[in-house]
């Protein structure tokens, strides 16, 4: 069948292979991107449309009242792009959008998701693309709630109770908690209802690379597995673009033309969420007079008008919550302003689009920034055929001084009237943070990658460092001679360093009661555990449900009597995650006096877990019996999408194993752990042969209800297997060809 993209300058083909990957063969780069846009829209049009609704602050116009708060936040903080500058990458964006819009024009009927939502496809523009980039940086790690919660806890109970529960905390931070105590006590925690998604959980990814000197092939290798909420369709769309002298493969968010992770014949790059701190919270003494108006369209209703007050630091959160009915308007002595580093920094649609054309790691780094600004919040590792390894923090940051020197770190709210906190903004050359390390390898896994290096704090609320430490441990263990097979084995690794760290303290707690058969059994299991979260592990059935019991929340509540703050802490401020026994019981901590109470609570929780396991599984427990993965389409309860679901199936791993599987108990009374988050895909690229790779996604590359490739990767992914993906035209197992004539 012949298709048409009016702007195409030469014939092109989209060859769909047997695992649902489109291979676009074109005569020039622009036409290749036109084909990419067409292919993506043909499989993921609703996903593309929905994410643009979010990014442009127009979700309520299609989906109703529920999204008004989100739209208002995105408009008030300029998540929605504004004053879009021109960019050298605009020609790629325009070509991609021409492909997308050509597919929209080809539709004979409205796709079912659009019918269900009562809306229609439309043409997409540079504004959509620029907004999508900014939306990516906005939602990945909202540190402002961590800052409010930490400040409020310290103001309520004293700094010393929580000093050890944050990565860095300075004397200047403590001074500001004292200065702002009354204001911090008055902050209404209902501001957490401004979050989107409404419940925040930590995400993550793994990425590492080795130099040619450590590689068996004599060229650099890179491994990539980004962790995303498990969904159908998959978070990313995967495609191969080919033009004379150029081949590139990568993963992109539907609707944007750049490959977040990808490679060509010269350079390979991977990405992890950086847990980069791009927000500052300011207390203002006076309610500002200035306000800005916003009109939010709502499906089936009249548009709603809002006037949001602003200080020079940013929009006033209480003004937004009062407008939305989340808080009650009142005369306040203090209000809270929020600064997002990107709010006053216009960004283009073409930024990032040149990444797939880079020939070196340095060129790839240049594509991340325009005028020293990048809308992302990521660590990016790039390696090239010249054996150059670079790691960039792809972000725009405020340069807070307190990083190994006097000054605030930014982890608690600041006085808005103090001009010393009018921080400068980061420069691109400061964010090339590693280059050709002496070790010969680079890795990131959402932990603090900087330590005391750098001029200012970058990661204030990183996740646990267990996965990062395990990557380095395995790299050191092998030493050299790395090949694809070893990297694949690393991606499937199930040893949990966090468990290895924590289990001794739990065993000590269990030893306090020798009379309980449940505690004796748990102690025996944990004492003999190799810390491998295999589906057949029995000890894992005790350890991971214990973490989900959130003993630390009950403990802090019992000691401090502050359930109002603490009961929502884990759900809306997950970056406050340094709550292991060791964090509580370190030298000089006021919690030390209550160690026996903590250990008693651990014993209570372990007893309940053993009893629940016995009633659920009898005497024979396996981690895979209670640790299951299941995911599907958000509309799967309706007939059209009812088959777009996989699982439940047993799966190993945890949030801190390299074979990542983040789980949660449906309720405190449940023993079953539902896996909701993990690798969206896995791949390994050896630049010695960048036309072939090992690759698998969590579900598939399809997105339409009638697609054959919605879940065709799932079985292989679940078993830790990979497909051999070729980018060579004559080697493709072609399932279908979409041919495009000129004009």
Image (spheres, helix red, strand yellow):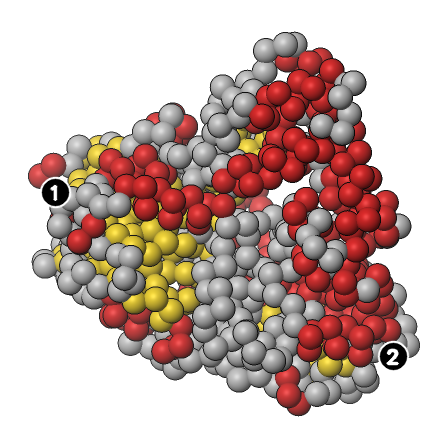
In front here: 269 or 607? 607
For disc 1, the neighbor class at 10 Å (few under 14, some 14 to 19, many from 20) is few
Q: Which mark is residue 42?
A: none
The residue under label 2 is 333
Secondary structure at numbered mark 1: helix
Return the x and y of residue 275 as percentages of the image width and height: 52, 59
Rendered residue at 17%/53% (across/down): 213
Taking the spot 69% from the left edge, 69% from the top edge, the residue there is: 412
Residue 370, by quadrant, is bottom left
Task: Tell me where residue 162 appears, x and y as whole percent.
Answer: 73, 59
Residue 209 visible in this rendered orientation of the protein: yes
Residue at 35% of width from left, 38% of height from top? 490
Position in image of residue 125 (x %, y %): 41, 66
Quick check: 730 above or below 388?
Answer: above
Label 1 to label 2, Cα distance in Å? 68 Å
Q: Please give the label number shown on residue 729.
A: 1
Task: Residue 152: tell me if it is visible.
Answer: no
Circle nearer the viewer, 1 or 2: 2
Up-down relation of residue 621 to residue 153 (above or below): above
Q: Residue furthest bottom?
A: 419
Front residue of this view, candidates 128 and 120: 128
Which residue: 67% across, 85% down?
A: 312
Q: Is residue 323 left or right of residue 376?
A: right
Q: In what element is the residue under mark 2?
A: loop
Asked if residue 446 lies left or right of residue 2, the reply is: right
In this picture, is 270 found above or below 598? below
Total of numbered circles in the picture?
A: 2
Q: In this rendered view, identify the residue nearer to me: 146 or 49.
A: 146
Name which of mark 1 and mark 2 comes first in the sequence: 2
Q: Is residue 136 left or right of residue 288?
A: left
């Amino acid at each position: 069948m012949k298709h048409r993209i009016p702007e195409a300058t030469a014939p092109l083909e989209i060859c769909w292979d047997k695992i649902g990957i489109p291979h676009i063969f074109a005569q020039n780069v622009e036409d290749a991107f036109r084909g990419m846009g067409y292919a993506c829209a043909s499989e993921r049009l609703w996903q593309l449309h929905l994410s643009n609704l979010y990014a442009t602050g127009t979700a309520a116009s299609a989906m109703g009242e529920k999204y008004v708060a989100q739209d208002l936040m995105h408009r008030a903080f300029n998540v929605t792009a504004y004053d879009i500058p021109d960019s050298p990458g605009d020609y790629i964006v325009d070509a991609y959008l021409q492909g997308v819009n050509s597919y929209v024009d080809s539709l004979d009927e409205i796709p079912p998701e659009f019918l269900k939502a009562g809306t229609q496809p439309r043409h997409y523009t540079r504004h959509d693309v620029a907004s999508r980039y900014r939306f990516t940086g906005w939602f990945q790690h909202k540190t402002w709630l961590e800052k409010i919660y930490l400040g409020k806890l310290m103001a309520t109970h004293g700094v010393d109770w929580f000093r050890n529960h944050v990565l860095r905390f300075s004397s200047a931070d403590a001074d500001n908690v004292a200065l702002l105590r009354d204001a911090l006590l008055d902050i209404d925690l209902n501001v957490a209802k401004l979050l989107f998604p409404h419940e925040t959980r930590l995400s993550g990814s793994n990425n590492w690379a080795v130099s040619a000197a450590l590689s068996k092939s004599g060229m650099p290798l890179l491994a990539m597995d980004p962790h995303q909420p498990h969904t159908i369709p998959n978070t990313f769309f995967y495609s191969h673009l080919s033009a004379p002298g150029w081949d590139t493969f990568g993963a992109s968010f539907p609707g944007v033309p750049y490959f977040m992770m990808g490679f060509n014949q010269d350079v390979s790059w991977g990405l992890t969420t950086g847990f980069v701190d791009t927000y500052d919270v300011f207390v203002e003494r006076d309610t500002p007079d200035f306000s800005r108006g916003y009109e939010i369209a709502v499906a089936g209703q009249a548009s709603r008008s809002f006037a949001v007050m602003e200080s020079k630091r940013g929009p006033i959160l209480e003004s937004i919550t009062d407008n939305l009915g989340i808080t009650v308007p009142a005369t306040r002595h203090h209000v809270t302003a929020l600064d997002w580093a990107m709010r006053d920094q216009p960004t283009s649609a073409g930024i990032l689009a040149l990444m797939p054309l880079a020939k070196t790691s340095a060129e790839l780094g240049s594509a991340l920034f325009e005028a020293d600004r990048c809308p992302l919040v990521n660590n990016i590792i790039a390696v090239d055929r010249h054996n150059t390894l670079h790691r960039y923090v792809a972000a725009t940051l405020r340069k807070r001084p307190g990083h190994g020197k006097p000054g605030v770190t930014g982890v608690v709210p600041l006085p808005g009237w103090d001009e010393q906190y009018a921080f400068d903004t980061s420069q691109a050359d400061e964010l090339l943070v590693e280059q050709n390390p002496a070790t010969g390898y680079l890795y990131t896994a959402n932990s603090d990658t900087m330590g005391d290096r750098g001029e200012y704090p970058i990661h204030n609320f990183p996740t646990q460092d267990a996965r990062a430490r395990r990557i380095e441990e395995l790299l050191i263990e092998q030493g050299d001679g790395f090949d694809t097979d070893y990297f694949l084995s690393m991606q499937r690794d199930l040893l949990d360093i966090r468990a290895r760290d924590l289990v001794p303290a739990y065993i000590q707690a269990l030893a306090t009661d020798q009379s309980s058969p449940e505690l004796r059994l748990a102690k025996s299991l944990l004492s003999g555990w190799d810390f491998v979260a295999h589906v057949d592990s029995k000890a894992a059935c005790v350890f991971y449900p214990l973490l989900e019991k959130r003993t630390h929340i009950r403990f802090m509540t019992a000691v401090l009597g502050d359930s109002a703050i603490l009961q929502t802490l884990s759900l809306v401020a997950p970056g406050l995650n340094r709550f292991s026994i060791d964090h509580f019981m370190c030298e000089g901590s006021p919690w030390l006096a209550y160690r026996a109470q903590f250990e008693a609570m651990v014993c209570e929780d372990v007893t309940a877990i053993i009893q629940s396991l016995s009633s659920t599984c009898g005497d024979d427990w396996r981690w895979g019996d209670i640790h299951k993965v299941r995911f599907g389409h958000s509309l799967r309860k309706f007939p059209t999408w009812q088959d777009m679901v996989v699982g439940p199936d047993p799966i190993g791993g945890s949030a801190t194993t390299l074979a990542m599987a983040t789980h949660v108990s449906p309720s405190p009374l449940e023993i079953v752990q539902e896996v909701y988050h993990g690798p969206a895909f896995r791949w390994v690229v050896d630049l010695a042969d960048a036309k072939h790779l090992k690759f698998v996604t969590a579900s598939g590359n399809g997105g339409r209800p009638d697609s054959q490739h919605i879940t065709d990767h799932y079985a292989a992914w679940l078993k830790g297997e990979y497909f051999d993906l070729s980018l060579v035209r004559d080697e493709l197992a072609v399932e279908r060809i979409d041919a495009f004539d000129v004009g």
